[in-house]
Image: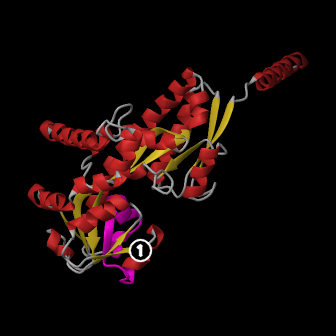
Amino acid sequence: MSGKWKRIACMFVVAAFLLSSASLLTAKEPEYKWRFGQTSVRASQGESYKLFCELIEKYSDGRISVEFFPDNQLGTLDEIFHAVQDGDVELCGVAPYVNLVPGGMFNWMPWTTESWEECKMAFARPDGVLYVPMQKAMQEVGTHILFTVSQGSYGIGNNVRPIKTPEDFKNLKMRVSSSLGCVRGLQNMASGTGMTVETVPWGDLYNALAKGVVDGCWSMWPSLVEERHYEVMKYYTSLDWMWDANQVVINKDLWDGLPDDLKTAIQKAADEAEAHQYAIQERMAVEFQDFLKKQSSFEIYYPTEAERALFREKANVVSIWEELCTPWLEKNFPGQNMTQKILDGLKENREKVLAGK
């Protein structure tokens, strides 16, 4: 290359460098740098949470940057949630146990949601029949719901016998959690059978089943496979008597103080992440069942609607709602008869779903 062309090439290199440097110098820093805290998270959930963070940055035109911290990097469930309440962390996914959210029982009331379609309707923003009380419950403790995350239905498994009727709970020792509505529902369904319950931390459940500390538990398709419950249980009844739901929340004061255009951007990201997660979990529920059907030492029983109706009737759902939900609802929605309104709304959702099949 001649000296002339070398000089021209150098000029282009210098110009490119100066333009790049100018671009870096003029690039705007995000107005908001947030953290999203999460306890242990399945890979499928993590996909949607990461997508949510990326979409916030995209739809806010870079004004908001969100870094995702999964797997207890920012603390335990309680610690992360309290940090969001205090504003030290901006976003988190939370299982709203009543020790954290006094009105959080609505996610896990028995026999309220029995299909993906019903779940989407019940938690739909802004007026889903379960979204309304859950949003009120979250706002009561200083947070605001952005979207709901679900892993689907719960059934009941054990190592003694297939559970086809309420009588099959006879003398079983079942693991339960602090989800009081579910505990009440299980106890009612098994009343008169001699079944007993034992509180075992979820992380200890595999060993408790393997060692016979408990005979069985409620579980769901993802846990049966990904947490390997199928290895330590012989029988599983796909009862669909309880539905999993958690929420992704933001500090309420932070949310209330945002300009409307950023609220719109965040909610658009939330809606897309929620739809993304529903699609993944619906697909995986089918894949998990296909996998489990191939396991020679694991038996799945799919009860008929008539058989499920016996469990539902014996659960005495209305009494559980009156005990656990009505006092909170009367305090927060005085004079509105919200217990009956919610139960009627859930029934209407089910009728719509059945009519569309």
The residue segment tinted magenta is 210-232
Q: For residue 217: magenta?
A: yes
Q: Is residue 17 left or right of residue 234?
A: right
Tell me if residue 188 comes above or below residue 322 in the rendering.
Answer: below
At 41% across and 40% down in the image, what residue appears? 332
Please say which color scheme the image uses: secondary structure
Give the x, y percent position of residue 131: 37, 39
Question: Which sits in the foreground, 26 or 179?
Answer: 179
At 85% across and 16% down in the image, what residue appears? 8
Q: For residue 15: magenta?
A: no
Question: Which sits in the foreground, 129 or 117?
Answer: 129
Q: Quadrant of residue 341?
A: top left
Residue occupying the far front of the picture: 335
Tell me if residue 20 comes above or below residue 91 in the rendering.
Answer: above
Q: Quadrant of residue 179?
A: bottom left
Res. 164 visible in picture: no
Give the x, y percent position of residue 301: 18, 66
* Mark 1 surroundings: few (<14), some (14-19) or many (≥20) residues within 10 A: some
Give the x, y percent position of residue 126: 38, 31
Res. 189 visible in picture: yes
